[in-house]
């Protein structure tokens, strides 16, 4: 393994590309629950926003086939251009190449649909033609079958792609909880998108550290034992 791939991801050495997160592409995904896929993709986008990661968004045949990019993803980057393509391989589009080059970072983190087509072809081409390091976010990407996703990931790993997950990337960017400038935002991200981890953070804050609950709610009524199981009738 090259020494460069032993470097951890940092906000200064990496960039991100989202490929074809569009409804018609998501309809075909069978390798991951599609709501989980969207959750993870949007979480990765929010993490990139927290750490000011240069981000490229590219789409394919929006009007004729694929439909519009997830609104939840676009809401994270409302000013970003959408780089439309006809080719399944994003590397074939000059706008995409220029965007990556202008960002000036060799480590390219990829989230896209489908793993076995658009992700794989882009990864292999970008590595072959321009010597980019590719980090494939496995749980923010999806294939048309589990086998399609798994074997595409294996093919890419054999070629030198580094497999990662969205939370791994986010926490690698954070690296140290003493980095207080991003700490609160990362904790909010975790609580919203990280499932059991986020529940654990809420529990620790409220039950261990005594922090107030993060939402207001109605009064909690004390238990009232029923009288011999007989309900009161009005």
Image: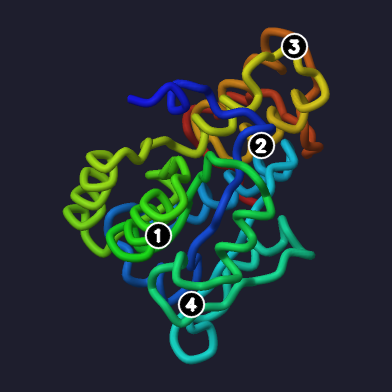
Q: Which residue is mark 2?
A: 189
Picture residue at 63% right of the left edge, 24% below the top: 223
Which of the labelled discs sits on residue 178, or is there none?
A: 3
Mark 3, Cα crowd under 10 Å, few <14 / some 14-19 / many 20+, is few
Q: Nearer the viewer, residue 50 or 28?
A: 50
Callout 2: helix, strand or loop?
helix
Q: Is residue 35 left or right of residue 150?
A: right
Report which quarter residue 72 is drawn in: bottom right
Mark closest to the chain's N terminus, 2 or 3: 3
Say which of marks 3 and 4 sits in front: 4
C-alpha span from label 1 to label 4: 13 Å
Q: First in sequence: mark 2 or mark 4?
A: 4
Crowd rating for badge 4 (residues with CA inside 10 Å; few <14, some 14–19, many 20+): many
Q: Are marks 1 and 4 in contact (CB under 8 Å)?
A: no
Residue 171 lies, in percent from the top left, at: 58, 26
Q: Which residue is mark 4?
A: 60
The residue tagged 1 is 122
Task: Tell me which residue sits at (62%, 49%) in the image.
Answer: 45
Q: Residue 23 placed where, x, y %?
A: 47, 73
């Amino acid at each position: 393994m090259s020494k460069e791939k032993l470097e951890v991801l940092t906000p200064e050495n990496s960039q991100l590309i989202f490929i074809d997160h569009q409804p018609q592409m998501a309809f075909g995904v069978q390798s991951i629950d599609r709501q989980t896929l969207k959750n993870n993709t949007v979480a990765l986008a929010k993490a990139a926003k927290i750490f000011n990661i240069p981000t490229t968004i590219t789409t394919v045949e929006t009007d004729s086939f694929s439909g519009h990019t997830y609104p939840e993803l676009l809401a994270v980057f409302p000013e970003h251009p959408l780089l439309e393509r006809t080719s399944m391989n994003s590397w074939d589009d000059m706008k995409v190449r220029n965007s990556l080059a202008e960002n000036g970072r060799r480590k390219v983190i990829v989230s896209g649909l489908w793993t076995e087509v658009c992700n794989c072809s882009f990864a292999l081409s970008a590595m072959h033609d321009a010597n980019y390091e590719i980090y494939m976010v496995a749980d923010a990407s999806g294939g048309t079958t589990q086998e399609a996703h798994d074997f595409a990931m294996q093919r890419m790993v054999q070629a030198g792609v580094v497999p990662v997950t969205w939370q791994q990337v986010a926490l690698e960017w954070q690296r140290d909880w003493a980095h207080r400038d991003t700490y609160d935002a990362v904790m909010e991200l975790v609580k919203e998108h990280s499932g059991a981890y986020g529940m654990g953070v809420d529990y620790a804050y409220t039950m261990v550290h005594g922090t107030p609950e993060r939402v207001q709610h109605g009064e909690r009524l004390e238990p009232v034992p029923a009288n011999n199981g007989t309900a009161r009738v009005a």
